Image (cartoon, helix red, strand yellow):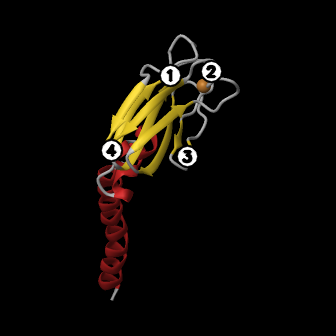
Amino acid sequence: MRALSLMLLLCAIAIPVAGCGGDDDDSSGGGGGDTSTKAEDDGGASSGGGGQTLKIAADPGGALKFDKSSLTAKAGKVTIVMDNPSDLPHAVNIEGQGVEVTGNTVTKGGVSKASGDLKPGEYEFYCPVDSHEEGGMEGKLTVK
Ligand SMILES: [Cu+2]
């Protein structure tokens, strides 16, 4: 009788230990940290299915401009992804053809995204923060 209960006790100990090992493997494979740090464009694109991503960046020296003044895209879902390496807060908006999308305002090291379902035509992309647009932080987006 005592031998049997000892066996049960050993099993009770062994099973949770094995379970812990399995959980560890799962969590490391999931890579939860990657998704939060990278904020990769794949995530946004997958929701719309085959959208285009246009990458721009704010001037790293703090000037009121983007590194590109004109962009071209095909009609459909278009996402502008802006890196902000400067000390000023910036964001990216897309406006035109009755569409107006506002990206989130981000500080140094952040990424602002604006995406819309765009028809062919001329659009503008600009920074909506303070008077950055008037300062020259704008460009033309042509959708074909
Ligand atoms: Cu700005």
* Residue indicated by mark 2: 88
**Amino acid identity at mark 1:** Ala
Q: In front: mark 1 or mark 3?
A: 3
What amino acid does circle 3 point to?
Answer: Val
> Which residue: 31% across, 75% down?
11
Nearer the N terminus, badge 3 or badge 2?
A: 2
Q: Which quadrant of the structure image shows residue 39?
A: top left
Q: CA distance from mark 4 to mark 1?
A: 20 Å
Residue located farthest toward the top when viewing the structure as drawn? 61
> How much space separates mark 1 and mark 3, taking CA atoms?
18 Å
Q: Are marks 4 and 2 in contact (CB under 8 Å)?
A: no
Question: Residue 137: which quarter of the image?
Answer: top right
Residue located 46% across and 44% down the image: 36
Which comes before the other along the chain, label 4 or label 1?
4
Disc 4: which residue = 52
Q: Say which residue label 1 marks.
A: 58
